Image (cartoon, helix red, strand yellow):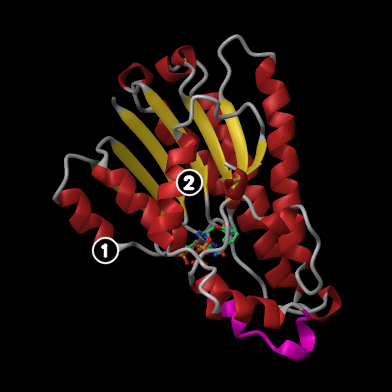
């Protein structure tokens, strides 16, 4: 099968692990992060896959979405049996009560985690409207969400808002797509708890300002975190499911 995958946040963590596994499957992979992942270049060179890595800041989402749309319009949509956008990139702010946090950092986290996925989804849906994958029912948007989009936690107001917003715009886009004769399918998926930089930062937060600190430490110490490669395999298996999109908001732990 000829595949095109667009993946944000592939320089490390869950995104890097998904990118490695996607390259093993062949096809074309476009990644968007601020940093290049040199390991991916080696993987791509050793495989039949085509890799393009864009270094850009998703805190500038209007520019990123316009660039993606223009690039997609240069491609022959008949050439891909499957087209997928995975909105994986996110950032966490300093951990603490909302009023203690810097406005600029909060704004960046909202733009990277919520505004960019929404604008990239819009660009992707527009550009692929007449593509073969839309006729085949294999055009998909996977938004990487979090349980914190569904359960509020203290000292994480921005992250909770980002993921709740991601879940809810996914529900709304899914409704839009039901009215389309050639719909794309969209899911906002909580990927479980993963042993990445994001978890390291949560454990490094000041316990006095983070009531859940001990819980995050305990999850690590009791081996509850998935390795990125394990989580990536679960998420990519979910993406391939025949019923992908039937429920626009999902949790890998229920799959
Ligand atoms: N880890 C967990 O336990 C967990 C749990 C639930 C949900 N999630 C979700 O899973 C996804 C991946 O998380 P992770 O743990 O792998 O995070 P991570 O290790 O912190 O990696 C975040 C990725 O996002 C990219 N990114 C951050 N800011 C960016 C910006 N301004 N512009 C472009 N790219 C940017 C980073 O690339 P650059 O720094 O190179 O830009 C990096 O590749 C996120 O959506 C996260 O919310 C994670």
Where is the N terminus found, in terms of image quarters?
Answer: top left
Please state the extent of the stretch shown in magenta in the rendering. Answer: 200-211
Q: Is residue 5 rendered to the left or right of residue 147?
A: left
Residue 134, percent from left and from top? 48, 17
Q: How many marks?
A: 2
CB atoms at circles 2 and 1 under 8 Å apart?
Answer: no
In the rendered image, which quarter is residue 228 located in?
bottom left
First in sequence: mark 2 vs mark 1: 1
Q: Is residue 70 left or right of residue 53?
A: right
Query: Most extreme residue toward the right, as rendered?
Result: 99
Dot 1 falls on a residue whose secondary structure is helix
For this orientation, the residue located farthest to the left is 46
Foreground of the two, 32 or 253: 253
Residue 216 picture location, percent across and down = 64, 76
Compared to residue 207, the image places residue 229 above or below, namely above
* Labelled disc at residue 171: none
Pick out the residue farthest to the front.
222
Residue visible at 71% across and 62% down? 159
Residue at image mark 1: 38
The answer to whether 118 appears left or right of 229 in the picture is right
The reply to whether residue 30 is in sight is yes
Q: Residue at x 59, y 74 (%)?
A: 219
Check residue 184 for magenta coloring.
Answer: no
Residue placed most toward the observer, 122 or 133: 133
Element type where label 2 sits in the image: helix
- Residue 10 percent coordinates (x, y): 41, 56
* Residue where numbered disc 2 is placed: 235
Which residue corresponds to the image point at 58% horizontal and 55% vertical from the top-left? 60
Quadrant in the rendering for residue 181? top right
Separation of marks 2 and 1 at Cα, in angstroms: 23 Å
């Amino acid at each position: 099968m000829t595949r095109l995958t667009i993946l944000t946040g592939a320089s490390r963590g869950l995104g890097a692990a998904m990118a490695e596994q996607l390259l093993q499957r062949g096809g074309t992979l476009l990644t968007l992060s601020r940093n290049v992942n040199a390991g991916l270049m080696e993987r791509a060179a050793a495989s039949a896959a085509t890799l393009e890595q864009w270094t850009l800041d998703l805190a500038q989402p209007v520019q990123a979405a316009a660039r993606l749309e223009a690039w997609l319009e240069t491609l022959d949509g008949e050439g891909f049996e499957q087209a997928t956008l995975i909105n994986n990139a996110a950032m966490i702010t300093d951990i603490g009560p909302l009023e203690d946090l810097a406005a600029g950092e909060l704004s960046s986290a909202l733009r990277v985690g919520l505004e960019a996925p929404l604008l990239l989804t819009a660009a992707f849906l527009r550009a692929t409207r007449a593509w073969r994958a839309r006729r085949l029912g294999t055009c998909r948007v996977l938004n990487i969400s979090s349980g914190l989009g569904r359960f509020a936690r203290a000292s994480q107001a921005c992250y909770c808002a980002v993921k709740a917003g991601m879940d809810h715009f996914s529900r709304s886009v899914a409704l839009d797509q039901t009215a389309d004769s050639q719909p794309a399918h969209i899911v906002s998926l909580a990927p479980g708890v993963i042993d990445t930089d994001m978890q390291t930062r949560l454990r490094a937060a000041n316990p006095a300002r983070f009531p859940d600190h001990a819980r995050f430490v305990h999850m690590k110490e009791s081996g509850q975190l998935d390795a990125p490669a394990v989580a990536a395999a679960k998420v990519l298996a979910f993406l391939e499911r025949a019923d992908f999109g039937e429920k626009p908001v999902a949790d890998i732990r229920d799959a």
